[in-house]
C-alpha cells in the first residue's frame, strides 16, 4: 500500500508501527507457549529511538544492541519472520535457534549482536570504530543500551577510548526510566547522562523520544560528527510501557504512573502529527496498520511452522567450520564403555 | 511436616540469619523493593529494612568489591549476583581480591561474605544466562563452594554459609526454585562439608551435586526396576569436599560415575574423576565414568539446551552399561 503523501515522517511511522506490531506478536508467541523461554523484552513505547537513529545510519554502519533490541534490528531492515523464528528457538531463525531474543545478530545488516549482559555489547563498537578508521570503511558504529548500563564501568572505559582515539562511534542510551524495577533516580544521583559523555570529551545530547523526528535530527548531527571523528552520546528519553520481561507485572510502579507514561506514545504522536499536518489521512494510516498487522501475523505462523534445530547442530559453530569440533560426551563415554564391554 | 519450596527455604534462611546476626546485609540488584529476580528476597525489606536489603545499580564488579570491603570491616554481606554468568565481570573482585586477602595479608583478616547466585539450564535463557560455572570457583583456592540440591539443604547450607570465616560462593539452581518438599527445618542438619548419601546400593556409586542429584535419584529408581542398585552421593559442598564419603562407597562398590551439569572438559566432574581414579585405583573394577555437559555454549532452543546436559535417562543408560 502506498501512502498518499511521500513524507518522510510517514516512513518513520511505518517503521515504528512495524516495531510495535512485531512486539505485540512476540507477546502472543509467548502466550501461545511457542517462544523459547520467557526472557522476552519488548520495546513498546521505545520505537522512536530505533526508528529515529536507524533512519540516519548508512548501509555500511554497524551496531550492537542490548537485550531489548528487536525494534532496532527491525528498523535496520531485519526480516521479521526470521526474527520471530529465532525468538521461538527455531532452525530458520537468524542464529538457527542458538541465540534467541537476546542474542539476535546479522552481520549482513551490520548487526554485531544483541547482548544479555548489561553493557556487554558496548565496547565492541569501539573496536568497530577502530576498524573503520584503520580500514577506511567510512562507517560509524553505534552501541544501543538501556539506562541500566549507564552504571556499568565498561561504558566509561569505552567512551574514554572512543574520545581518546577520535573514533566514529555513537553511544545511544534508550532511557526508558527503569532497569527492571529500579527507576533511574534509584540507581544514580545524577541522571543528566549527557554530562558524563561530555566529561570524557564526547558530544552529548538528550532528546525527548516522544517525537521521532526530534530523535532523528539529534542522531543526524551526532552521527555526522562521529563519522568525522568526534564520537558522541545520545540519550533518548522514553517510557517502558510494560513489565521488564514477560513475567514481570511491574508491581513496583503505580498504575497512574504507567497510564501517564503510556501517554508518551511515539507511534500515536507521529500518527497525530501526520493527520494534523494534512500529510496523511486517518484512513490511509489505518490501511497501513492493517497491512502491517497481516505481515506480522505471518511471522508467528512462520515461527510456529519452522522446525526445531537438529540435535546434532549443537556442536556446530563453537569453532569455525573446518576446525576440530568438540567431541560429544556420549562418544567419549561410548569409547570407555566399549573397552569394558570387550 | 510442612511443604516448602527451595525458594522459600532460602528466603527463610536469610530471614532467620538476619534476625540472629545484625551484621548481615544483603547487597545486589533488585534484592530489596523487587524481592529478587527469582523472588528469594521477597518482602525481606519489610522485615529487615532498606538499610539491610540494599538495592544497587547494575554494577556487578562494585557490588562484589563492596561486599569484600564490608566483610573486612565488620559486616557479613550477602552479595547477590543475579546470574552466575555475570561472574565474567566480577572475577577480579572474587578471585583476585576476596579469595586471596587472608593469604596475601598473612592471615590478618578474612572475608566472611557469601556470594549468592544461581546457575544452570532449564529456562531457555540462552548462552549468557544458563551456565554452570562452579569449576571456576572450585579452581580458585580461598573460596568455599556450596550447591544445595534439596529444600532442606537450601536452608541449612545457607545458614551455615553465613557463619563461615571465609568467602562462600553459594550457587542455587534456577530450575529448583519451585521445587517443593516436606521439611522439618528444626531437625539437626548434616555438618557443613559433609556429603549426603541419598540412596544406598551395591552396584555402583553416582557422585553428584545440585540439580543432578535429583536426576541421579530418578535414574536410580529406573535402575532399581531392572535390579541395579545405585548409591547416590550428594556432595552438598564442593569446597570443602567430603572425599572420605566418596572413598568409602567407591571402595565398597567398585564402580563409580560422576555427574555434573557443567561442561565436561576441566570441569568439576574431571576433578572428582581424577581423584577417585588416583585414590581408589585398587578398588575400581571399571574406569570412572563422567556424565557431564557438552563442551559447548547453551542454546536458547529448548531441544538443544536440554540435549546438551545430563538427564535422568542418560544417567540410567550409562549406569546400566557400566554395571552390565
Ligand atoms: C551484567 C548484567 N547484570 C544484570 C542483568 C540482569 N538484567 C537484565 S536486564 C536488566 C535491566 C536493564 O535495564 P536497562 O539497561 O535500563 O535496559 P531495559 O531493560 O530497561 O531496556 C537487568 C538488571 C544482566 N542481564 N546483565
Ligand atoms: Mg531501562
Image (spheres, helix red, strand yellow):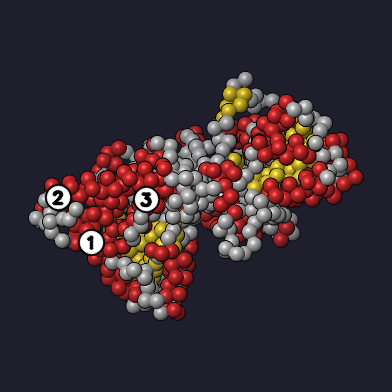
Q: Which residue is mark 2?
A: A284
Residue that carries the numbered disc 3 in the rendered image: A81
Say which residue label 1 marks. A214
Q: Position of residue B105 (x, y in %)?
A: 71, 60
Residue that sits furthest to the front in the current view: A342
As displayed, is residue A292 above or below residue A52?
Answer: above
| Front residue of B27 and B217 | B217
Q: Are marks 2 and 1 in contact (CB under 8 Å)?
A: no
Would residue B17 appear left or right of B144 to someone viewing this image?
left
Callout 2: 10 Å neighbours few (<14), some, many (20+)? some
**Rounded to the nearest whole Å, what is the CA distance between mark 3 and mark 1?**
30 Å
Q: Position of residue B82 (x, y in %)?
A: 52, 46
**Mark toward the viewer: 3 or 1:** 3
Mark 3, chain letter?
A
Q: Nearer the viewer, residue A170 or B155?
A: A170
Residue B95, how many percent across, how many down? 65, 57
Q: Which disc number belongs to residue B284?
A: none
Q: Decide if residue A48 is on the left or right side of residue B319.
A: left
Q: Residue at x 67, y 54 (%)?
A: A327
Residue at 36% over, 62% down: A172
Could you say which quadrant of the image residue A39 lies in?
top left
| Label 1 crowd (10 A; few <14 / some 14-19 / many >=20) | some
* Label 2 element class: helix
Between marks 2 and 3, how big is the CA–CA gap? 25 Å
Amino acid at each position: 500500500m502506498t501512502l498518499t503523501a511521500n513524507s518522510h515522517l510517514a516512513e518513520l511511522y511505518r517503521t515504528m508501527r512495524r516495531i510495535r506490531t512485531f512486539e505485540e506478536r512476540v507477546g502472543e508467541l509467548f502466550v501461545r507457549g511457542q517462544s523459547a523461554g520467557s526472557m522476552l523484552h519488548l520495546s513498546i513505547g521505545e520505537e522512536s529511538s530505533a526508528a529515529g537513529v536507524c533512519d540516519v545510519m548508512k548501509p555500511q554502519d554497524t551496531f550492537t544492541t542490548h537485550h531489548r533490541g528487536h525494534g532496532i534490528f527491525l528498523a535496520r531492515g531485519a526480516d521479521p519472520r526470521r526474527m520471530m523464528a529465532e525468538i521461538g528457538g527455531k532452525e530458520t531463525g537468524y542464529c538457527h535457534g542458538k541465540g534467541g531474543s537476546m542474542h539476535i545478530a546479522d552481520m549482513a545488516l551490520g548487526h554485531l549482536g544483541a547482548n544479555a549482559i548489561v553493557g556487554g555489547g558496548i565496547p565492541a563498537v569501539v573496536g568497530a570504530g577502530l576498524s573503520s578508521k584503520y580500514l577506511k570503511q567510512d562507517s560509524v558504529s553505534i552501541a544501543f543500551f538501556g539506562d541500566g548500563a549507564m552504571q556499568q564501568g565498561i561504558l566509561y572505559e569505552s567512551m574514554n577510548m572512543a574520545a581518546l582515539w577520535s573514533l566514529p562511534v555513537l553511544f545511544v542510551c534508550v532511557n526508558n526510566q527503569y532497569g527492571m524495577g529500579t527507576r533511574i533516580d534509584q540507581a544514580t544521583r545524577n541522571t543528566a547522562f549527557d554530562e558524563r559523555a561530555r566529561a570524557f570529551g564526547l558530544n552529548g545530547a538528550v532528546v525527548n523520544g516522544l517525537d521521532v523526528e526530534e530523535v532523528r535530527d539529534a542522531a543526524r548531527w551526532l552521527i555526522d560528527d562521529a563519522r568525522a571523528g568526534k564520537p558522541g552520546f545520545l540519550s533518548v528519553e522514553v517510557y517502558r510501557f510494560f513489565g521488564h520481561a514477560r513475567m514481570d507485572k511491574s508491581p513496583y510502579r503505580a498504575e497512574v504512573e504507567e497510564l501517564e507514561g503510556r501517554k508518551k506514545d511515539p507511534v500515536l504522536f507521529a500518527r497525530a502529527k501526520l493527520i494534523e499536518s494534512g500529510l496523511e489521512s486517518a484512513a490511509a494510516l489505518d490501511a497501513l496498520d492493517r497491512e502491517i498487522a497481516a505481515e506480522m501475523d505471518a511471522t508467528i505462523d512462520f515461527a510456529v511452522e519452522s522446525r526445531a534445530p537438529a540435535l546434532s547442530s549443537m556442536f556446530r559453530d563453537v569453532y569455525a567450520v573446518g576446525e576440530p569440533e568438540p567431541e560429544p560426551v556420549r562418544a567419549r563415554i561410548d569409547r570407555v564403555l566399549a573397552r569394558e564391554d570387550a | 511436616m510442612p511443604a516448602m519450596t527451595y525458594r522459600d527455604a532460602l528466603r527463610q534462611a536469610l530471614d532467620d540469619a538476619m534476625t540472629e546476626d545484625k551484621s548481615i546485609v544483603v547487597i545486589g540488584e533488585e534484592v530489596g523493593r523487587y524481592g529478587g529476580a527469582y523472588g528469594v528476597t521477597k518482602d525481606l525489606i519489610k522485615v529487615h529494612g532498606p538499610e539491610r536489603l540494599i538495592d544497587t545499580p547494575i554494577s556487578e564488579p562494585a557490588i562484589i568489591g563492596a561486599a569484600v570491603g564490608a566483610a573486612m570491616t565488620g559486616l557479613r554481606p550477602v552479595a547477590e549476583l543475579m546470574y552466575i554468568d555475570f561472574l565474567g565481570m566480577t572475577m577480579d573482585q572474587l578471585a583476585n581480591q576476596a579469595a586471596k586477602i587472608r593469604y596475601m595479608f598473612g592471615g590478618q583478616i578474612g572475608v566472611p561474605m557469601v556470594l549468592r547466585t544461581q546457575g544452570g539450564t532449564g529456562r531457555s535463557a540462552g548462552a549468557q544466562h544458563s551456565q554452570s560455572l562452579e569449576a571456576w570457583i572450585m579452581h580458585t583456592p580461598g573460596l568455599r563452594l556450596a550447591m544445595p540440591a534439596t529444600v532442606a539443604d537450601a536452608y541449612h547450607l545457607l545458614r551455615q554459609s553465613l557463619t563461615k570465616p571465609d568467602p562462600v560462593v553459594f550457587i542455587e539452581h534456577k530450575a529448583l526454585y519451585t521445587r517443593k518438599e516436606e521439611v522439618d527445618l528444626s531437625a539437626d542438619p548434616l555438618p557443613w562439608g559433609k556429603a549426603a548419601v541419598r540412596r544406598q546400593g551395591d552396584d555402583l556409586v553416582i557422585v553428584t551435586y545440585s540439580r543432578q542429584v535429583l536426576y541421579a535419584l530418578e535414574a536410580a529408581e529406573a535402575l532399581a526396576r531392572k535390579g541395579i542398585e545405585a548409591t547416590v552421593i550428594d556432595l552438598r559442598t564442593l569446597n570443602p569436599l567430603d572425599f572420605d564419603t566418596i572413598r568409602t562407597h567407591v571402595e565398597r562398590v567398585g564402580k563409580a560415575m560422576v555427574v555434573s551439569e557443567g561442561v565436561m572438559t576441566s570441569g568439576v566432574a574431571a576433578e572428582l574423576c581424577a581423584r577417585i581414579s588416583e585414590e581408589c585405583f585398587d578398588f575400581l573394577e571399571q574406569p570412572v565414568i563422567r556424565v557431564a555437559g557438552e563442551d559447548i555454549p547453551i542454546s536458547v532452543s529448548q531441544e538443544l539446551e536440554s540435549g546438551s546436559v545430563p538427564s535422568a535417562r542418560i544417567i540410567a543408560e550409562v549406569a546400566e552399561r557400566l554395571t552390565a
